[in-house]
Image (spheres, grey):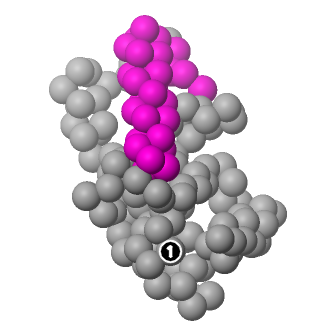
Amino acid sequence: MADIFNKKKRSQIMSRISGKDTKPEIIIRKALFSEGYRYRLHRKNLPGNPDIVFPSRKKVIFVNGCFWHGHTCKKAALPSTNKLFWKKKLTGNKKRDKLNLEKLKAMGWKSLVIWQCQIKKNTFETQINKIKNFLEKE
């Protein structure tokens, strides 16, 4: 199926996709704040600019979009057009994510990745408990 937008319009649409303060990220942040956790956001001095940073605990949380970070759920399906470009782009994103997690570990930081698809009404409480366990565990 061909793209319904011309190249210029598609570029404009794609440029408006935000890399931070996404809806899933804000949902997680609000839940953590209401539980009494305090954090920093998008620390540029750490590999991968983690979404949520707990400096005193040396722990970070990435809230990843399923499509952009190549998750294995149905939200991460490749578009039917320009497949070669998207496969290369998403493979590169996954490699970069893995490298950033390795760098953080080498620096003594612990990381947790939460996927966009995991933030649903029926699994939300489970994810918050998972995050709380991650933060409280040495």
Magenta segment main secondary structure: helix
Query: Compared with residue 89, is residue 134 higher up or lower down, i.e. above or below?
Result: below
Query: Helix, strand, or loop for circle 1?
Result: helix
Residue 40: quadrant of the picture: bottom left
Task: Describe residue 131's horizontal placement relative to residue 92 as left or right.
Answer: right
Asked where in the image residue 50 lies, by quadrant, the reply is bottom left
112 or 72: nearer the eye? Answer: 112
54 vs 7, nearest the viewer: 54
Quarter of the image with the C terminus in it: bottom right
Q: Position of residue 37 (x, y in %)?
A: 54, 85
Q: Amino acid at mark 1?
A: Arg
**Where is 39 relative to 71, above or below?**
below
Image x and y of residue 60, in percent = 48, 62
- Segment colored magenta: 77-106
Q: Can residue 23 be seen at all in this image of the molecule?
A: no
Residue identifier under label 1: 57
Seen at 44% across and 47% down, the residue is 106
Q: Is residue 91 magenta?
A: yes
Residue at 42% x, 61% y: name it. 51
